[in-house]
Image: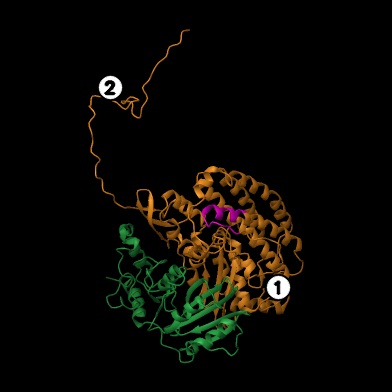
Chain colours: A orange, B green
Amino acid sequence: MAQKTVEIPVGRNPEMGIDGRPVQSPFQPFDIPEPDLGTERMLINIGPQHPATHGVLRLVCELDGETVTKVVPDIGYLHSSFEKLGEYRDWNQIVPLTDRMDYLAPLIYNCAYVMSVEKLMGIDVTERCKVVRVIIMEMDRIFGHLLWLGTTAIDVGAFTPFLYAFQQREKIYKLHENLTGARITTSATRVGGMMADLPEGWTDQLRAFLRDFPITLAEIDRLLTRNQIHIGRTQGVGVINAEDAINYGFTGPNLRAAGVDYDVRKDRPYYDYETYDFEVPVGQHGDCYDRYLCRMEEMRQSVRILHQALDRLPGGPINVEDPNVSLPSKTDCMSDMESMIHHFKLITEGIPAPEGDCYMAVEGSKGELGMYVVAEEGGTKPVRWRIRPPSFVNLSVIPKLAEGHLVADLIMINASLDIVLGEIDR
Amino acid sequence: MTEEHLSAFDAIAAGPAPSDPTTGGAPRLPAAESDHPSIGALGERFGDAVLGQRPTAGDQHVVWIAPARSFEILSWLKDDPDQAYDMMSDVTGVDYGNGRPVEVVYQMFSTRHKRALRVRCPLPLDALEIDSVVPLWRSADWLEREVYDLFGVTFRGHPNLKRILMPLDYDEGHPLRKDFPLRGRYSRAEQTRRALSQDVERYYGHEVLGEEGREPQELAPEIGTRGAEGGGA
């Protein structure tokens, strides 16, 4: 068969040849003077209902072309007045309010709250309780970071890590369910101990998770850490230096990514964290990529802590043996007069607190989570219960980080801060 | 609706309950001395402006300072190399009710000396004003707005003092004050009516960026200012 060569003029426009001249156009070319279009700043609202805002957050942006010149976060859509509600509830009734704030790592909030109340009252929890709380807090650090990892990857267009991360989160959901009966609203702690001891076989389930999880984490690491697109979207974006990061109130992985070695577990240790062997990752550049690296490494370190905690988990009671603090067992309550009286007194009156105030900071998955309780002499309800919300302060930095960047970078910066709106709005 | 409604406004007009002579006034001063180095230095340097101090909850330390010199004291705590409280973890308020002063609470931490300090500043109910610390710590920006929103404390010199958690035009007062009823000042029916009759469009203009924003006082009147005309209108 004979070959025939066909030449097709290819240009930007089908009506224009490759040399830029009109091919078959009824219009003759003429010079158009460059119009003076005048520039105007454009106002756009991202959210309050938008998947990239990671909750009910509204970002009001002023744009010059595609560059963000000003961004104002507008919050409060999820305000539930938890702090006001807490003033009307006795110490143990507040626990269910705490896990509804950070529904991505509820057990850390459960623990932080009762830790501050116990410190105020001078209650020393049992050794077993301390280790159990370390276990559930580190487990939920992984839990919170996994959600951040999956959703952040989605924000820059990578879908696979999201599925991998949520597969692992589902396993932690199951661990939550086996431990507390609930997947998100755990309410696992009580003043002076836990709602219940670890169920039989729970530690084995956790060990099984710890066997599989690092493999998945390594897979996600391979997908993202050296990924050209991911690096291009995150390196040099949203940079903050160490001094500003402290001054602007950054805590947690966001602060450490800026090169500040501050971890509440190391600097103000609680629950014998100083005896666990783990390292605190510290970044260098303070950009989105370093925040990513810090959180990835924190998950690996949490796995290390979990192994050590499971190995040292002591036996013995999980609740303090003080009838003014811990409820007696149901069997005792039904067969023993004294226990019945204690049960009745605890339920009807609550636990009396000494006068004073207490601020307890723990290293939450988002940053320094502080619980501040103020009590009056003999008070069975707090005068004031305050949560020092890490995401709230972290989010307030977004105007500094995002101004001058593109809109697409604003999405990445917002994702890299790891916020949860339930806790910001409270 | 009007019956329940008017009674709620009566409570606003009446204002906070009068001081209980046994508990009102200055903070109850502690008996024990604390060995916190910053507290000793504060006492030596500022004398009378340090109203009191006490150790609390085991190993924590609180110091009460006079609101008139709060900015001076806090900037010294930040800049003095022996104190160097470079991290303002939290700014919040405490209202005890019964006419006792509303206290502004600062939680500070020094990353250099690894030391924490809590500073409390009692403000009498008729003068809820204190200097803003935003020039010292930018982290106080939103935290002070929250205290303003929920307690009604005005921070002098704050760059953008307006409500943050509650709606900008919320006119029922400051919810975390003890004289604020848990369910709000309006009846449920009135709250619903107000929510439905809101002009949401005006939240989507340039004023949210703060440039053409209205004065904060206009947006959030103090308790009692609406008492006379009533919300039933």
Asked whether residue A377 is in view, the answer is no
Image quarter for residue B212?
bottom left
Give the answer, above or below, for where B201 lies relative to B59. Answer: above
Q: Do callouts 1 and 2 point to residues on the same chain? A: yes
* Callout count: 2
Magenta residues span: A282-296
Letter of the chain that mark 2 sits on in the rendering: A
Give the structural element (helix, strand or loop) at label 1.
helix
Letter of the chain that mark 1 sits on in the rendering: A
Residue A391 image offset from top left, x and y in percent:
51, 62
Residue A162 image offset from top left, x and y in percent:
56, 47
- Tell us which disc is closer to us: 1 or 2: 2
Q: Amino acid at mark 2?
A: Gln
- A350 with respect to B12 (left or right): right
Mark 2 crowd level (few <14, some 14–19, many ≥20, 10 Å Cα): few
- A24 with respect to A111 (left or right): left
Q: Which mark is residue A164?
A: none
Residue B129 image offset from top left, x and y in percent:
39, 79
Seen from the viewer's position, the closer of residues A241 and B223 is A241
Q: Is residue A283 magenta-colored?
A: yes
Q: Which mark is residue A334?
A: 1
Residue at coordinates 30% horizontally, 67% vertically from top-left?
Answer: B214
